[in-house]
Amino acid sequence: MAKKTCNILTIILLAFAVNAYSAESRGVVSYDLQKMYTVQDSTKPVTMQDSTKPVTAQDSTKPAKKKKKTTITRMRDKRVTFETFDQNYERALKYYNNSQWLSAAGLFEELYPLSLGTPRADTILYLFADSYYQNGDYNMAALHFRDYVRRFPNSERTEDAFFRCIEAVYKTCPEYYLDQSNTTYAIEQIKAFLQAYPDNKHVEECNLMLDDLHLKLARKDLEIVRLYYNTDHYEACQVTAKNFFNKYSYSPLMPEAVYILVLNNYEYAKRSTERKKPERLKACLEAGKKMMLNYPECKYAKEVEKIMVDVTKQLEKYNQKSNNKS
């Protein structure tokens, strides 16, 4: 009897364990302040709803919002094609008239290949070059103005484009102490413009640009003369000074060049041997006479005059010695 009762209890416990396991497999156990453990049905989705916001049904009578154009669609609308040529041409002119130079240049650059062979090609290339000029990009401006002159030699704008080209090249010329290849090229282009259009209205401006560019080249060569003098290369200074005189005889820097040569020859004579000194003093005196003859009013004249007095005295002493020996 006791054994049978024990078997029944075992069966009851097993059944209870199986039911508990199946209940846990169907739900989740959650902690609650009022009930220690409750089993929730996992078959229903658990959602968090904001109780502060009332749930309302969507009004189906409201009109649907228009779809905004995507970035790709907007880009296609603005892309320069034959179909959008007129529209983009007007946009480019608007940018140009509003002084939006880079925006105008970008559109003109896209429009130009499509305009070749049409009456607008002339205008587009000119405004394209001028947009760069107005924006201060003189290298690009010179490049495209030069291209304009080459492509449209008989246009009414050709003379003006050529002048704008040399203006742009002139503005790219560096300071005198840098490489002067661009300066030499600018001089050549200005001379070519004056030869092509001798009666143009910009003759005076061209002459002023030429004077400034020649002065820049002269300044660079003068600094070479000075460098040789400052580094005690006296013979090299003499050679470069003479070359300077031949090349820039009408330069406003001539008085300074002669002054440097006088100082150079004076120092060279003082550091020479007794046998070489008279010859080099004579070279110094000759340079001083050149100064006093051609530039008597320059700011270096007084100092050169003092040097000449000293050189003359030294030469007189050498002449007396040579006379006594004879």
Image (spheres, helix red, strand yellow):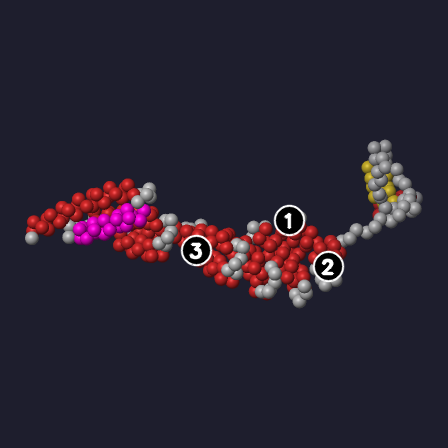
How many numbered tags mark residues here? 3
Q: Which mark is residue 34?
A: none
| Residue corresponding to mark 3 | 180
Position of residue 68 measured from the top left corner of the image (x, y, whole percent): 79, 51
Given contact means CB atoms under 8 Å apart, are the residues at marks 3 and 2 in contact? Answer: no
Closer to the chain start, of discs 3 and 2, is 2
Q: Of marks 3 and 1, which one's residue comes earlier in the chain?
A: 1
Indicate the secondary structure of the residue bearing disc 3: loop
Magenta stretch: give its range. 276-295
Q: Which residue lies furthest to the bottom in this view?
A: 117
Taking the image as shown, residue 262 lies to the left or right of residue 23, namely: left
Name the secondary structure under disc 1.
loop
Image coordinates for residue 277, horizontal then vertical, percent? 18, 50
The residue at which mark 1 appears reads as 99
Tell me the amino acid under the disc marked 1.
Answer: Ser
Residue type at numbered disc 2 = Asp
* Residue 137 makes an appearance in the image: yes
Q: Residue at x 33, y 43 (%)?
A: 298
Q: Residue 86 carries which label?
A: 2
Which residue is at 49% across, 52% downward?
A: 204
For residue 156, side relative to residue 85 (left or right) = left
Q: In this view, does 36 lie above or below 166?
A: above
